[in-house]
Amino acid sequence: MKTVFTILGLLVATVSFGQANNLEATMTTNDTRITELNILVSVDSEEELESTFKMEDIQNILDEVADEGEVSFEIKCNKKKSDMGISSSVSYRISGNSNDVDGFLTKVEHIKNTAIKYYRSM
């Protein structure tokens, strides 16, 4: 009987001292910042190019990039295989800084128009 009380006493002591103390913790939240953004669009036709993205989409993405962030945009135009079985592709790429969003969007628009001309010339 003495052994049972000893084991029961040790069990109660272990459980009561084993409880976690209330600890006060401080939580800090850091803002997530995008400092570098690379966009690559690979298309196979003019229709796909025009439906893949709109300039408003690129504007919304650029709004998320932190000041002084590096941004780049690339369009890869894939040409279907010709009669001779040869396939080819051409890429247009620009890089810039997020401080000049309007200038960057102008260049993106220019690249998109150039890619459309590439498909129309085929």
Image (cartoon, rainbow, N blue to C red):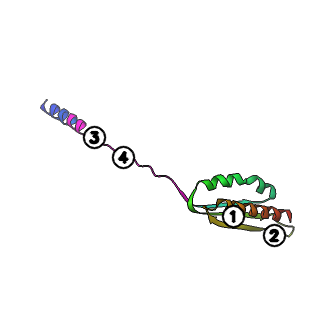
Residue at the left extreme? 2
The answer to which quarter of the image holds residue 25 is: top left
Kind of residue sitting beneath label 4: Thr
Q: Residue under circle 3?
A: 21
Q: Residue 79, position in %: x, y?
A: 80, 64
Q: Where is residue 37 in the image (x, y as percent from the top left)?
A: 60, 60
Of residue 48 and residue 86, the one placed in the foreground of this image is 48
Q: Which mark is drawn over residue 86?
A: 2
Residue stretch in magenta: 12-35
Q: Which image quarter is the C terminus in?
A: bottom right
Q: Which mark is residue 74?
A: 1
Q: What element carries label 1?
A: strand
Helix, strand or loop under label 4? loop
Disc 2 or disc 1, which is closer to the eye? 1
Most foreground residue, 78 or 91: 91
Instruction: Please name whichever residue, 7 or 31, is drawn nearer the observer in this view of the structure.
Output: 31
Which residue was labeled with disc 4?
A: 26
Identity, as a three-letter code, of the amino acid under mark 1:
Glu
